[in-house]
Image (tube, helix red, strand yellow):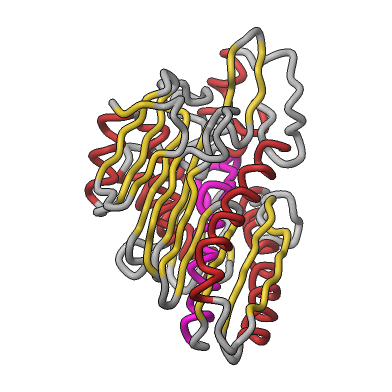
Amino acid sequence: MKRTKKVLSIIVLIITMAVSASLFSACNAKVSDSVFAFGTVSEISLKGKKAKNTIKSFDSLFTRLDVLFDAENEKSDVYKINHADKDVILQISPETYELLKLAKTAYSDTDKTFNVATYPLSKLWRFTSDTFTGNVTSLPSDEQINDALLSANLESLTLLSDNRVVKTDKDLQLSFGAIAKGFAGDAAIENVIKDGQSGILNVGGTIFTVGSGEYKIGISSPRDTAADYFAKLTLSGGAVVCTSGDYERYYIVDGKRYCHIIGRDGYPVDNGIISVTIISKDRNALSGAMCDVLSTAVFALGRDKGVEYAKKYGAGLVIIYADNTFETFNVDSFELKDESYSKR
């Protein structure tokens, strides 16, 4: 957890330094705020005549969506779905319904690799918010994993009309940890655009830029090195940058690292990739929610299938490997800052 906080602070510092001279020094002062939601800290900095009002709407929006999407909150849509019997029709919010539509499409497109129905597996591996401590001495058995896999089938959830859903498997349980931040960021940015603001939004490491100006965004080094960060990207307004890595929530048992991203086999992904960054130059063409999907999916799919999937959406892509090498795809402005890594 300490590592995650460090990563977020570095990214925010880089962006703030990059845009302060051109974006925030004009007659309209910068207005900033932060809120804890989706298990992380989100930060927003805006400039514009309605910035203060937009900031207030940001707080209320994130608080409301956090309640809807929190698997541990008894008031949430996700909790309602997770604890429902099979064949019971449930009414959910339009936001949860839209998120499920995107999640089911990604589930199909990635051959079930991107899967929001792995909540029992995440609990079994002790990666959920109520089970994660970072200090684990024993691992689940193969039998326990196989049992949990039986219910990890998103096809057991059917989307009906009018924001209604129904489960065909009572044991199906969902978690939106891999997609909620990007979805919430998309909703927040719509308010920023509507009110004519410029600025940045950092939703737990998923970065949104809006308005004129040039933005310098740092990609964190996935391992502790002498460098402050791995690389620098230069982007315009309307961009999204999202990173998934094995350093965000993990533990080490008998010298082996186990990360929070669960693969199709029910085990934490271990394929040589340690960090994936997705870059969208235009959020209207590639949304924050889809960037969240892509970063997790590429990480879990592995290099070849992952690159193919990212290219399908025209995404920029940076992959860092455990052997201290990296690759970039469709990235125009990339400046390596951590010399402990080399390009493949």
* Image quarter in which the C terminus is found: top left
Residue 225 on the magenta span: no
Q: Tell me where residue 301 appears, x and y as whole percent.
A: 35, 32
304 displayed left or right of 181:
left
Residue lying furthest bottom = 49
Q: Tell me where residue 49 appears, x and y as whole percent.
A: 59, 92
Residue at 26% of width from left, 53% of height from top? 313
Residue at 31% of width from left, 29% of height from top? 343
Residue at 46% of width from left, 67% of height from top? 209
Q: Tell me where residue 240 appears, x and y as whole percent.
A: 42, 60
Q: Report the span colored magenta.
A: 167-194
Q: Is residue 114 visible?
A: no
Q: Nearer the viewer, residue 110 or 152?
A: 110
Residue at 35% of width from left, 52% of height from top? 105
Residue 177 on the magenta span: yes
Q: Tell me where residue 291 appears, x and y as whole percent.
A: 41, 53
Q: Which quadrant would residue 127 be assigned to in this image?
A: top right
Q: Nearer the viewer, residue 340 or 269?
A: 340
112 displayed left or right of 192:
left
Determine whether 216 is above or below 296 in the image: below
Q: Which quadrant would residue 126 be assigned to in this image?
A: top right
Q: Nearer the viewer, residue 280 or 101?
A: 280
Determine whether 229 is above or below 36 in the image: above
